[in-house]
Image (cartoon, rainbow, N blue to C red):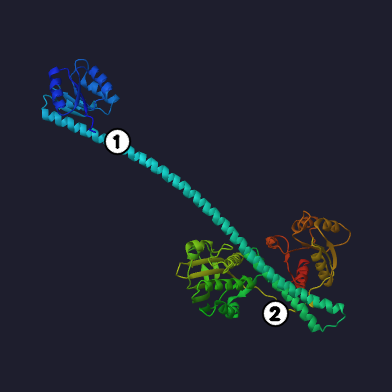
Amino acid sequence: MSAEPSRILIVDDDEAARYVKRRLLQAQGYTVSEASLGRDAVVLAAAEEPHLALLDVKLPDVSGIEVCREIKSRYPQIIVLQTSAAFTGVADRTRALDGGADSYLVEPIEPDELIATVNALLRMRDAEQQAGRITRNLEQLVDERTHELAEANRHLADEIADRRQAEAALWHTQKLDLIGQLTGGIAHDFNNLLMVISGNLELLHEAFDGGAKLPPAEIRQLLGNAEAATEHAAKITQQLLAFARRSTLTEETVCFTDLLADSEGFLRRAAGEAIEFSCACGSGLWHCRVDPVQLEAAVLNLVVNARDAMPRGGKLNIEVINVSLDRTSNEVERGAPIGDYVKIVVSDTGEGMSPDVIERVFEPFFTTKEVGKGSGLGLSQVYGFVKQSGGHILIDSKPGKGTMLSVYLPRSVPLTEPSANADPDPRHAARGSETVLIVDDNEDVREVTAVIVRSLGYEVLTAGDAAEALALLHSPRGIDLLMSDIVMSGGINGFELAKRVHVLSPGLPILLISGYPADRGIEADEFPILRKPYRREQLARYIRAALGDPVVLS
């Protein structure tokens, strides 16, 4: 199919000139129409929409420049070639071009020049139209592609959301599984301890019920077994609270040189034979005020974690040194407070960790080990202990380059410890004759506490809640000490009871008792507090201290 010939409109009041131009252009295959007046030219432009207007400047009715402006304002796609024999100066050509003409020829025009100019202008028009079509096609393609990308992004966002939801569900399931493993292990350990306690007590019951006379050494052995199991249960509870970062630490002044000397052999065995183990302490190590049991557990966790990072063997090093951090220290820039510390560094040549793993390594239950190989609790326990001790912990690690984990524990001035010659025999516990009001909503605990306090020589009154305690305080019987559990039912807890009593009887000594770690901090602020579980001798010292005697409580 041949292309439609270009249409040309000739506007000239000179009939001979129109004839010449028409014959030349028709010979080139163009379709030609004619007009002798400017107004007619505008009408034909509207009716025929020519591709090019060959427009003389000097017309009888209106200037060709005005006609050009009119055509261009209505039909900007029509090319206008302005011609003139009367207006031939530079200013004339400039005025015509400013009026919208695409080109300007001075008559008389050579036929070849006219044909060449017309052809060139039409090629330019075709090129512009082609470029316009290409631009429109590209814009359409861009719009379509943009829409496709938007749809793809929406689908991707939905997939990411679904994946995150699935990961969260999986993570929750894994946590439940790990909590199940943890609680199962705890139940197993506590059942064993309860077996020891109940078994020894049962043997004592049978001996007394049957009238058998047991030697004192055997009685002490049975009672000692039950007491040891009780202490073991208390340690398990403390480890659980350390994991929850809510434990009440039993702080002592610790010498790292002695502590590591005592535990190095155990740590070496924990590392295993495939690991090249070394341990070094700097000279003149400062003392720290920490819980030694939790400290040993933390170091053991770090050693086990380093060992597991080296399944094919490697080097594990423990180094303990004194460090002083100031505002120029790299550790301070990474979040450690300024001060003096004992720094414990546990380094290994294992697999190392990526930045993503380091960011989550202290999260409870987070682990990179295979299922069943780790609970994800070890480093969380270490972090909880260090933070509760006022310290800081940093990790330096890269995949394939090993790991260095640094624990900073604040320096402490050694305190005067109780005399090593103090008699631990419970029969020599501090005694008294004052009247003590014991408040506890647990009947079993209230009764055993009352028996212990009576055995120390005191008169004892008991109350099951705060309201009953307040009633007894208003009775004529004189009370020398209020001893209350903190967590109680009935709407008023022990701390609130203590504050009320302090207002009603400002001089009455008060001793609070709790096994719940969230009550930590009350002692330093208002009232002394004794932590459960406690021994008889420890309770005796706290009672004397609350009554004003100079007693060492550490």
How far apart in space, not on screen, are marks 1 and 2 (Cα)?
100 Å
Residue 188 lies in quadrant = bottom right
Answer above or below: position of 476 versus 282: above
Q: Left of 505 or right of it: where is 522?
A: left
Callout 1: few (<14), some (14-19), or many (20+) C-alpha neighbours within 10 Å?
few
Residue drawn where x is 77% and y is 73% of the image: 198
Whole-percent x, y for residue 218 in the image: 79, 83
Which residue is the extreme one toward the front? 1
62 over 118 or under it: above or below: above
Q: Quadrant of residue 17?
A: top left
Residue 36 is situated, as x and y percent measured from the top left of the image, at: 19, 17
- At 62% from the left edge and 74% from the top edge, which residue is drawn? 254
Identify residue for label 1. Answer: 132
Q: Nearer the viewer, residue 244 or 336?
A: 244
Mark seen at residue 313: none
Q: Where is residue 258, by image quadrant?
A: bottom right
Precedes in sequence: disc 1 or disc 2: 1
Quadrant including the C terminus: bottom right
Q: Is residue 213 left or right of residue 57?
A: right
Residue 420 is tagged as 2
Residue sitting farthest toward the top:
61
Percent of width and height locating residue 132: 29, 36
Amino acid under disc 1 = Gly
Query: Residue 263, can we see it?
Result: yes
Q: Nearer the viewer, residue 122 or 435?
A: 122
Q: State which quarter of the image contains the N terminus.
A: top left
Type of the residue with mark 2: Ala
x and y percent of residue 403 in the render?
Answer: 49, 70
Residue 244 appearing in the image: no
Disc 1 is placed on an element classified as helix
